[in-house]
Amino acid sequence: MNENEAIGIFDSGIGGVTVLKEILKLLPNEKYIYYSDSKNNPYGDKSDEEINNLCENIVEQFINQNCKVIVIACNTASAKSAKYLRKKYKNIPFIAIEPAYKMVYDYAYNEPTLVMATKGTIESEKFNLLYHTYDNHKTILLPCVGLADIIEEGNKHKIETYLEAHLEQYKGKVKNVVLGCTHYPLIKEEIKKVLGQVEFFNGAPYLAKHLKQVLEENDLICDKNEPSKIQFIDSSNDEQKKKRFFEIIKE
C-alpha cells in the first residue's frame, strides 16, 4: 500500500481535467499531482522528438515527487510518446489515454462517424493502427488544428466561430463524434449546437477503469477514507488556468 504517494497526471494544458474528473469518480481518496504544460502547448504541431523530450521532463518531475503511477492525459503525447516512456521508465506504470474509436466499432458500427483530434494524433502511427483495425468505412478524420488552444483560452465566441467554420458541413451527416483530445469534452454542448444530436465517444471513463485495475493489481491503491488532494502545476505559472482547472473540477 502506497497511501502517501501521488498519481501524476499530465497534459499539454488543462484539458486533462476531463480525465481527472472521471478518475475521481472511481478513486476519490487518492493524492494527485496534475501538470499542465501550457508553456509548450500545443503538442499537436511538434515533432516526435520534441514531444518525447517534453514528456520526459515532466515524468522526471513526477518521479522526483515519488509518484506511483503516471497518467498521460494528452492524446497527442499518448500517441507519440507512451511507447518511448514505457521503454525508458520500466519501473513505473503508465496509463495512456486513447481516442475512443474502438467504442464506435463495439457499439455503433454502422453509424457515420466524425473523429475530432489534433493533427499530431491523427497522423500518429498508434492512432492509424487503431483506425485501420476498427474502420467502419463511414468515418471522417478531422484534424482540429488550433481548437485545443482556443478551448484552453476559454473564449466562448472564438470556440463557436471555430466550430461553425469547421463542423457546419457535417451537420446531419454524422451520428457519432469521437472526442480525440481531452480538451474537447469541455465543449460538447457547443459541438451539438452545430452538428445537432450526436453520440459522443470519449476514452476518459475507460482510462479511469484501467487505472483503478492497475493500482489494485499492484497493491498501490489508497484505502484511506479521506478526500482526494489535488496539486496543480502549470509550466507557465498561469493563475487563470489554475482557477479554471479547479472550477471545472467542481462542476
Image (cartoon, grey):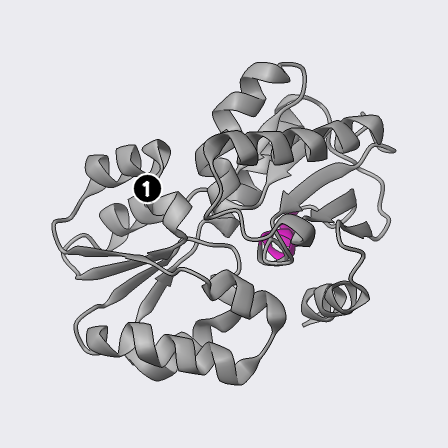
Instruction: Report the side of 194 relative to 135 (left or right).
Output: right
Q: Amino acid at mark 1?
A: Glu
Q: Is residue 98 visible?
A: yes
Crowdedness near tag 1: few (<14), some (14–19) or many (≥20) residues, C-alpha within 10 Å: some
Residue 165 image-quadrant placement: bottom left
Q: Which residue is mark 1?
A: 123
Residue 221 image-quadrant placement: top right
Magenta span: helix, strand or loop, mainly?
Answer: helix
- Considering only vertical position in the picture, is 27 above or below 81? below
- Residue 231 drawn at (x, y percent): 82, 50
What range is drawn magenta here? 19-26
22 vs 112, nearest the viewer: 112
Q: Is residue 30 visible?
A: no
Q: Quadrant of the N terminus?
A: top right
Residue at image position (60%, 49%) is 12
Counting labels gives: 1
Instruction: Report the side of 113 relative to 182 (left or right).
Output: left
- Residue 132 drawn at (x, y percent): 20, 37
148 within the magenta span: no
- Residue 9 drawn at (x, y percent): 67, 42
203 vs 76, nearest the viewer: 76
Residue at image position (54%, 52%) is 42
Residue at image position (78%, 32%) is 61
- Considering only vertical position in the picture, is 238 above or below 95? below
Instruction: Report the side of 220 relative to 175 (left or right).
Output: right
Residue at image position (69%, 46%) is 27
238 vs 14, nearest the viewer: 238
- Could you tell me which secondary element the residue under label 1 belongs to? helix
209 vs 141, nearest the viewer: 141
- Considering only vertical position in the picture, is 176 above or below 213? below
- Residue 157 drawn at (x, y percent): 51, 85
Q: Quadrant of the C terminus?
A: bottom right
